[in-house]
Image (cartoon, grey):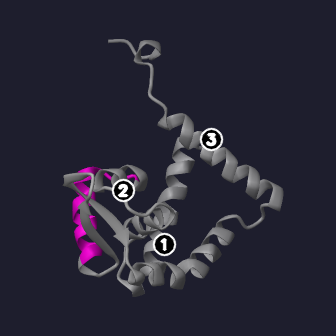
Amino acid sequence: MAPPSLLYSVKQVELVTRARLDELLKPAGVTALQYTALTVLERRDGMSSAELARNSFVRPQSMSDLVGALERRGLIARSPDPASRRRHIISLTEEGRALLDRYAPAVRELEDEMLTGFTARERTAFRAYLNRAREALGQPRDLSTSTTST
């Protein structure tokens, strides 16, 4: 029997990871998608909703609901952008930072569990390979070289 495709394997890892992260975060009342958005803001605070959506791998329409839920929980705050009256900037609150700090050890344990059996060198290489794959797929595509016919 042929091994599963790489895309299938990546999707399976993503689904298992999301389910485990949802389970881990359930006591905090936060979903894996909400947690991802919070970690994005932790790395780069002061983003617009559209920027946060792109960096959190969520559609802008879904981000609106997600931002509303996080704001109601007091984990983020929105404020007018001084450079554009129509745009709002989203920032992590102290409560949001505290939640991330509280769950950081458990999330690291989940990552360690996922990499059980990997050497330190393999862990570093795996992270680099995943980032390179993400960057490659994030590049604009040249549709003139597509292998599908119309």
Q: Which residues are magenta?
A: 57-71
SS assignment at label 1: helix
Residue under the image location 34 percent in, 78 percent down: 75
Which residue in the structure is indicated by mark 1? 21
Tell which residue pokes out farthest to the front in this image: 82
Which kind of residue does numbered mark 3 sit on?
Arg
Which residue in the structure is indicated by mark 2? 52
* Res 31 → quadrant: bottom left
Which kind of residue does numbered mark 1 sit on?
Leu
Instruction: State the quadrant of the N terminus.
Output: top right
Whether residue 124 can be seen here: yes
Q: Do tag 3 and tag 2 residues touch (Cβ < 8 Å)? A: no
Mark 1 or 2: the one toward you = 2
Give percent across and percent down for residue 53: 34, 53
SS assignment at label 2: helix
Measured Cα–Cα span from mark 3 to mark 2: 21 Å
Q: Quick one: label 1 or label 2, which is nearer the N terminus? A: 1
Give percent across and percent down for residue 74: 30, 81
Measured Cα–Cα span from mark 1 to mark 2: 20 Å
Q: Which of these two is toward me, 105 or 16?
A: 105
SS assignment at label 3: helix
Q: Which of these two is toward me, 20 or 102?
A: 102
Which kind of residue does numbered mark 2 sit on?
Leu
Which residue in the structure is indicated by mark 3? 132
Residue under the image location 26 percent in, 58 percent down: 81
* Res 91 → quadrant: bottom left
Give percent across and percent down for residue 89: 30, 61
